[in-house]
Image (spheres, rainbow, N blue to C red):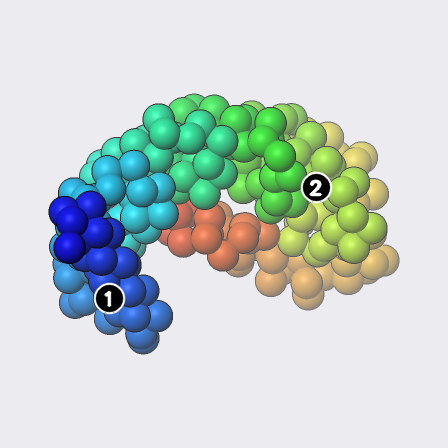
Amino acid sequence: MSFKNEKWDELERLKEKFLTLDKQQIVPSRNREKIRILEKILQLEPDEQYALARKGEILYDMSECDASVECFEQVLLINPENMRAMYGKAENLICLGELEEAVECYDEISRMHEPPDELWLDRGWVLELLGRHQDAIKDYDFFMSLDPENQNDFSVLERKIECLKLLGRKKEVKEFQKVVYGEGSQSSESFSKILHSLGIFGLSFGIAYVAVSFVIRIFF
């Protein structure tokens, strides 16, 4: 058997081993083992984008954001259009407190082929953190324009109301509150205030996790 064939067989064996391990129930203690396998794969095939991205995701789950973002940057050097890697980089930059850089990543994703609708929610939330509430409103409005169902997304209307309040646009706030809560309804609004106090209302699942991590890094 030639060296090339031996390398190929070993590569396939490692990939199969990793995929089997990765499909199992999530056990944090197995993350290091997963990374070891991925590093062996990358020794044989340094430009394997899936292995690099998956390594970045596992490191992110382990709160090793500096090492994680390096993995995603390696992927982007190989393929600047890799949306998964750009999203991963953005999430890590948020955890590292580099919000402007995270917005730049979302800007890049918006120019890629068929970005997900949730992009506009995620970027809007980061823009809110930066105090760019008018820009956040534009993203929320664009999200609602993409699909008729999005126009009835209670969480997005809530985030838009919050931005309008911070901009002092009282008349528009009242109009949107009527749409969201109905005439004279206060119970839903009170509940939403609790969610807003956590700063994670209306976020996609992944970005909500990032939001909590970011808050923890600031205050603890």
Residue type, mark 1 in image: Lys
In this rendering, which labeled residue sits more in front, label 2 or label 1? 1
Q: Position of residue 86 (x, y in %)?
A: 44, 35
Q: Can residue 155 be seen in this view?
A: yes
Q: Position of residue 30 (x, y in %)?
A: 18, 66
Q: Can residue 103 be seen in this view?
A: no
- Judge by depth and name the residue closer to the eye, 202 or 49: 49
Check disc 1 and report the residue beneath it.
Answer: 17
- The residues tagged by marks 2 and 1 sit, at their Cα atoms, a distance apart of 40 Å
Q: Which residue is drawn at 73% across and 30% down?
A: 169
Q: Which of marks 2 and 1 is nearer the N terminus?
A: 1
**Which residue is most to the front?**
1
Check disc 2 and report the residue beneath it.
Answer: 143
Q: Which residue is drawn at 64% across and 39% down?
A: 114
Secondary element type, mark 1: helix
Q: How many numbered circles are shown?
A: 2
Q: Which residue is drawn at 38% across and 51% down?
A: 212
Q: How crowded is mark 2: few (under 14 residues within 10 Å), some or many (20 or more)?
A: many
